[in-house]
Amino acid sequence: MIRRLARALGTYVSRSPVTAAYAGLLLSTHLWCTAVLSTAQAQRVLLGVSTNLDNLQDRPVRVLAGSMLFFDGTLTEITSEAFAGTLITLGLGVIVCLAWLERRYGAGRAYALFVLGHLAATLLTVPLIQVALAHGWYPDSVRHATDFGISYGAETVLATGALLLRPRARWLAAAGVVAWPVLGGDWSGELPDFTTAGHLLAAAIGFVCGAFLLRAARRAAPVPAPAPAPVPQPGPAPVD
């Protein structure tokens, strides 16, 4: 059993080296915050990389990049909603889907898609939050809320990966990608909470990218050569 696991891990690392390294980094930063730092120290670190309005105004590059170095979840409380989120974002999103995209399209394209989803979904929620604050739909504490992690990027690659599946599984997987933020979001106010909106935006970005990749693959597919015309067979020689 141990040999099989070691062999499977070695195969995974060799086929998806960048994703393996990224997953290892995410696990390391999570363990650093949960096992090395005190609760107060970890809170300061995570607040420092949170993509809230205050941080985006003061140090946008730092928080947009730093937020991707952590995942918001748990590895120990297996009966909690946070653990389910870890399975979706870190498990399915990064370790499974992002690795698959790396093997299929290369690390550059796979991570460009992941970063695009993270950045675009984060920045597109900013005007939504500002409008909601102006109308009193969100509490003012949203300006400096703790909001970090890989979930927008993970949602984007999951949506892209869903569209790249075989037709029978494609729409079921796409429905599951949308169901995650819809069922887990807070819809009690005039608007859904901003993280739900961000996840839906990330899914939309992923679906658009997946549709583009599907179209490109269909264009690149070789066109079958036409069947050769039948060669006429000589008839019987005329009789004098």
Image (cartoon, grey):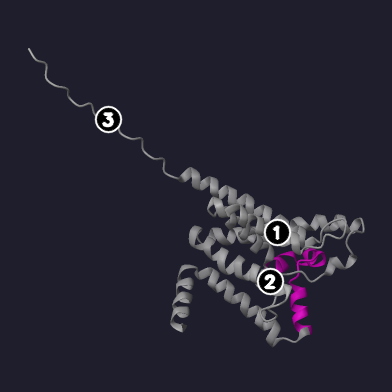
The residue pinned by badge 1 equals 179
Label 3 element class? loop
Sequence-wise, which precedes: disc 2 or disc 1? 2
Label 1 element class? helix
Residue 47's x, y, as percent?
A: 78, 74
Residue 204's x, y, as percent?
A: 68, 52
Q: Which residues are magenta?
A: 40-67
Sequence-wise, which precedes: disc 1 or disc 3? 1
8, above or below 103, in the image: below
Residue 214's x, y, as percent?
A: 54, 48
Q: For the residue marked with disc 3, what is the amino acid?
A: Pro
Q: Quadrant of the C terminus?
A: top left
On residue 230, which mark appears?
3
238, above or below 50, in the image: above
What residue occupies the far right of the structure in this picture? 136
User: Which quadrant would residue 44 be assigned to in this image?
Assistant: bottom right
Sequence-wise, which precedes: disc 2 or disc 3? 2
The residue pinned by badge 2 equals 84
What residue occupies the far left of the structure in this picture? 240
- In depth, the one of 174 and 15 nearer the eye is 174
On residue 228, which mark appears?
none
